[in-house]
Image: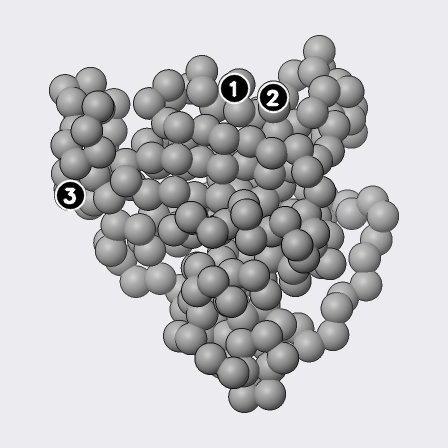
Amino acid sequence: MSGKTLCSKEIERYDRQIRVFGVEGQIKLKKAKVTVIGVGGLGSISSLYLTAMGIGKLVIVDHGRLELSNLNRQILYRTKDIGELKAKLAAQRLKELNPNVDIEYFTEEITSENIYDFIKEANVVIDGLDNWKARFIVNKACVELNKPFIHAGVHGAHGQVLVVMPGRGPCLRCIMPQTPSQREKIPILPTTPAVLASLQVTEAVKIITGYGKPAIGKLILYDGYSMSFHEIPVSRRENCPVCGVI
C-alpha cells in the first residue's frame, strides 16, 4: 500500500480526523515514524492514540515486565499478562487495534549508547519514562540528532509537558539544570498520565502534519486536584551543556 495515498478503508477509518487536518495531513502521518520510549502509564496512552490515528511506523522501547500495581493506569495490558514484557505485549495489542501501522519493539534498557539506534529515523520522540536519568539521556540524543522530543512527567494529580524543538526552544536540561530527586514508587492518580499523554500526542500530530502551533517555549503544567492548566514561558540557556552550542 502506497505511503503517498490512502485507500478507501483508511479514508473511512480516519474520517473524523481528516475533517480536521485534511487528507494531506493524514498522508503525512502515514509517512511518519514516531518512537515512544517507555510504554507504562504515559506510553500506553500515547502509543494507543498514535496507532489509532494511523502513524506510519511506531517504535516502542521498554525493558520492563508487567506488575500487578501497573494495571490501575497502564491500560494496554490485562491481569493475565503479569510477568510478561511490556514492549512485546504492547506491540501485539497495538497491531490488533490497527494492522496498517508498522510496529517495532525493543526490550532493552535505555543507555547513552543505544538510544541513537532507537531514535535515528524518528520524526518525533515521545517521553513515556518514569525516571529522570533516562529522560536526560533521551533529551541529549534528540538535541544532537535534531529530533523533536516531547517530554511529560506525572506525580499524583499533577504533571507537565515540554515540547523540545532543538535550536528553536529550550531543551529539558535548560529548564532543569540539576537532576530532580527520584522516588522509587511515584504516587499517581490513574487519569493523570492519560491527560498528559493525550497532550503529547496532540503536539506530535501538530509537528508532523503542520496543523496548529506547537507549544514551543512554554512549560505546560496540569493540576488535576484543582482542574487547572498553567503556562510558564521558558527559554534556552546560553550555557546549557546540552543545547547551548547549537
In percent of the image, x 24 and y 29: which residue is there?
A: 14
Structure colour scheme: one colour
Image coordinates of residue 55 in percent, x first then y, are: 35, 36
**Mark 2 = which residue?**
89
Is 126 displayed left or right of 31 in the figure? right
Quarter location, residue 237: bottom right
Is 31 displayed left or right of 194 in the figure? left
Quarter location, residue 68: top right
Whether residue 233 is visible, yes or no, is no
- Residue type beneath disc 1: Arg
**Mark 1 = which residue?**
93
Image coordinates of residue 165 in percent, x first then y, are: 43, 67
In percent of the image, x 70 and y 16: which residue is there?
A: 81
Disc on the earlier residue, 3 or 1: 3
Quarter location, residue 190: top right
Image coordinates of residue 143 in percent, x first then y, are: 51, 67
Do the CB atoms of the residues marked 1 and 2 lie less than 8 Å apart?
yes
Image coordinates of residue 83 in percent, x first then y, are: 77, 20
Q: In this view, does 19 lie above or below 180?
A: above
Q: How far apart are marks 3 and 2 (CA)?
A: 32 Å
- Residue type beneath disc 2: Leu
Q: How far apart are marks 3 and 1 (CA)?
A: 28 Å
Per the rendering, the mark at residue 24 is: 3
Is 175 displayed left or right of 203 in the figure? right
